[in-house]
Structures are given as structure tokens and as C-alpha cells.
Amino acid sequence: MNDLLERLAAEKLALLERCAVQRMQLRRDHRRVRDSLPWRRPVSATVPRPVMQRIVLGFALALLGTGRMGRLAALAGRALLLARAARAVSSLVAPSRPAR
């Protein structure tokens, strides 16, 4: 029984040491990634501008909620979508006009 306890204690110690080493490696990798990003505007350096605009717009619409302003924003979004779709269809159907 004593041999089993010693073996378990040694295995636990080995696992704790391995965990500590992995935490140190994660900290080192985190510092490398942090240092590789520019200090000014790290988000804009990693995320393209149109994507960031969509995220901000999504958060703004989420803050509006389901009230009147939320419904108005949803209606405006649908109207804009329909206008863009109509424009795309009309450009496909109508022959292209030469520039004057």
C-alpha cells in the first residue's frame, strides 16, 4: 500500500511540474503574439475594416432591442436589401450603356 501511495505522489508531482511548464510556454507564446502586434489599434491591425464595421453595427442593433427603433432599423435594413437586389437585377437585365 505504501508503494502505491509513493507512486501516486510521484505521478502527481510529475503532472504538476508538466502543468507548470505548459503554463510557462503559454505565457511565453502569449507575449510573443502580443509583442508582434502594433501597439496602436491592435484590433484594426488584425480585423479588416468592413468586418469591424459589421460587428459594430451588429452590436448597435442588438442594443436597440425589439422596441420601435429596433423594428425601424430592421425595416430599413430590409428596404436597403431590396433596393440593392433591384439594382443588381436591373444591371443584369438592362444592356450596358456607353459613356457619353
Image (cartoon, helix red, strand yellow):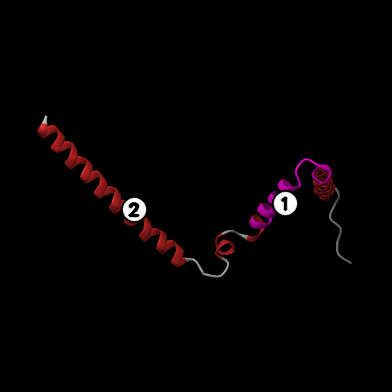
Q: Position of residue 100 (x, y in %)?
A: 89, 67
Which amino acid does the dot numbered 1 rest on?
Answer: Ala
Residue at the image position 51 percent from the left and 69 percent from the top: 38
The residue carrying pointer 1 sits among few (fewer than 14), some (14 to 19) or many (20 or more) residues within 10 Å by Cα, namely few
Q: Position of residue 78 (x, y in %)?
A: 81, 43
Query: Which circle marks residue 60 in the picture?
Result: 1
Residue 89 left/right relative to 51: right
The answer to whether 80 is drawn above or below residue 34 in the figure is above
Nearer to us in this view, 81 or 27: 27
Nearer to us in this view, 98 or 57: 57
Q: Which residues are magenta?
A: 52-71
Q: Which residue is mark 2?
A: 23
Q: Position of residue 3 (x, y in %)?
A: 10, 34
Residue 36 left/right relative to 17: right
Mark 1 vs 2, N-terminal side: 2
Residue 46 left/right relative to 21: right
Q: Is residue 38 magenta?
A: no
